[in-house]
Image (cartoon, rainbow, N blue to C red):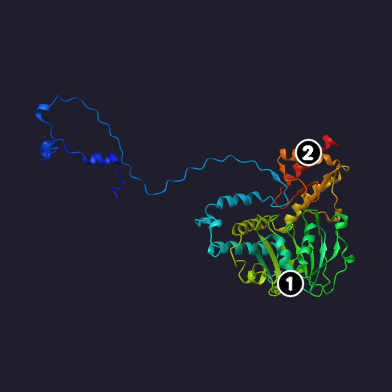
Amino acid sequence: MAAAAATPHSLLLKAAAPSTAAASPRTAFPAAARLPAAAAAPLKPMSIKCAATTHVQDPRPPPPPPAPAAAPQERVFNFAAGPAVLPENVLLKAQSELYSWRGSGMSVMEMSHRGKEFSSIIQKAESDLRSLLEIPPEYAVLFLQGGATTQFAAIPLNLCTPDDPVDYLVTGSWGDKAFKEAQKYCKAKVVWSGKAEKYTKIPSFDEVEQDPDAKFLHICANETIHGVEFKNYPVPKNKGGLLVADMSSNFCSKPVDVSKFGLIYAGAQKNVGPSGVTIVIVRKDLIGNAQGITPVMLDYKIHAENASLYNTPPCFGIYMCGLVFEDLLEQGGLKEVEKKNKKKAELLYRTIDESKGFYRCPVEASVRSLMNVPFTLEKSELEAEFIKEAAKDKMVQLKGHRSVGGMRASIYNAMPLAGVEKLVAFMRDFQARHA
């Protein structure tokens, strides 16, 4: 080991001979190499330079260069409808665990989804979600892929036969899309639609004529595009009493009595994580009756039997959802979260309503969403300038959905009150300059 670690300089020193002749009978050079006497010349001083030309390489890889000290980066207030803002403390925790998750020597993105490390992640995520929503044990929790849009087909494929009638109460674009997809797999029917009134209200449930033979009643609990939210839920009049709800954009924003639903589904990218994860909460007795044409990846029975690990799941997305669930529990649960959401929404709606018509929210006041606030300007030609100036002031993604125009502020769980306060201050200033 010592020889292997020697440097060229140390090798030269070790090879040096003692200066006294008595130390060795051998001459420094063979006789044949000695200069003839005739060629001898007076000795002159010489300067000797040691130039090391042999390099002993260290077999180990070089250590990574020290990370430069990162200057704190200023973040914007992101009002996007989804993918949407995530809690800063969640992002920072994920950052700290990105390179090596909790001493495992691996990133979550590198783990086997069947290893003990990821098993602990997905099991805790499910446990924390059950705590948040107080999910009864007779319900399965599935972490799936494909977005809520894939569930538009999966739900009728799993819950009914091609000849079963199904009721759809349509309060916005997503409910309408769910209905149109369901028509391929069952006898879907719209029992009420708000399209004629541009999706600005929810009907009195007494005026909705449900089919008593319907397999289930479907609603979209919060319409992201139009900003319409159910404050309470209709009671299904079908024999099984099944209510199915798309809760993508208000999932975990407030307490929900899960026992009132046969199935709840939600894309994670609004309130509980990044895009790529879809959560389905389904009563266990509804699992196992999928139509024969159901693709294996849409069969709830397959995913329930395999604990959401039938194939490789969106591991990092599920991990992020788990961090968000932890954060929501640390805030005191969904009752506390709802209080914060109400405070933010009330501030924004009050600013709109007190603007004397400069800003307008078309949604009926009793069903305005706490999550997605659409509004327009009295002078529509100023809308582009509003969005441009807001962006310069680090408030982004305020442009309304392409299908409705105007503006939309999505103020999900992770949007801090400071973000809404900054927005309303900007709105008042903009009005003062342009009214």
Residue 193 position within the rendered picture, expressed as x and y whole percent measured from the top left: 85, 61
According to the picture, the residue beneath numbered tag 1 turns out to be 159
Q: Amino acid at mark 2?
A: Glu
Q: Position of residue 328 (x, y in %)?
A: 68, 56
Above or below, comparing residue 71 to residue 48 in the picture: below
Q: Position of residue 270 (x, y in %)?
A: 71, 54
Q: CB under 8 Å between callouts 1 and 2?
A: no
Q: Which residue is denoted by mark 2 in the rendering? A: 385
Percent coordinates x, y for residue 138 in the rendering: 69, 72
Local crowd size for mark 2, using a 10 Å CA cut-off: few (<14), some (14–19), many (≥20): few
Q: Looking at the image, which is closer to me, 343 or 362? A: 362
Q: Is residue 135 visible?
A: no
Looking at the picture, does residue 81 appear above or below residue 126? above
In percent of the image, x 76 and y 64: which residue is there? 181
Within-10-Å neighbours for mark 1: few <14, some 14–19, many 20+? many
Element assignment for label 2: helix
Counting residues from the N terminus, which is met first, the one under dot 1 or under dot 2? Answer: 1
Query: Which quadrant would the C terminus be assigned to in this image?
Result: top right
The quarter holding residue 133 reads bottom right
Q: Residue furthest right?
A: 207
Q: Secondary structure at mark 1?
A: helix
Q: Is 320 rendered above or below residue 389?
A: below
Looking at the picture, which amino acid does disc 1 mark? Leu
Q: Nearer the viewer, residue 28 or 188?
A: 188
- Give the Cα distance between marks 1 and 2: 48 Å
The answer to which quarter of the image holds residue 291 is bottom right
Nearer to the camera, 298 or 271: 298
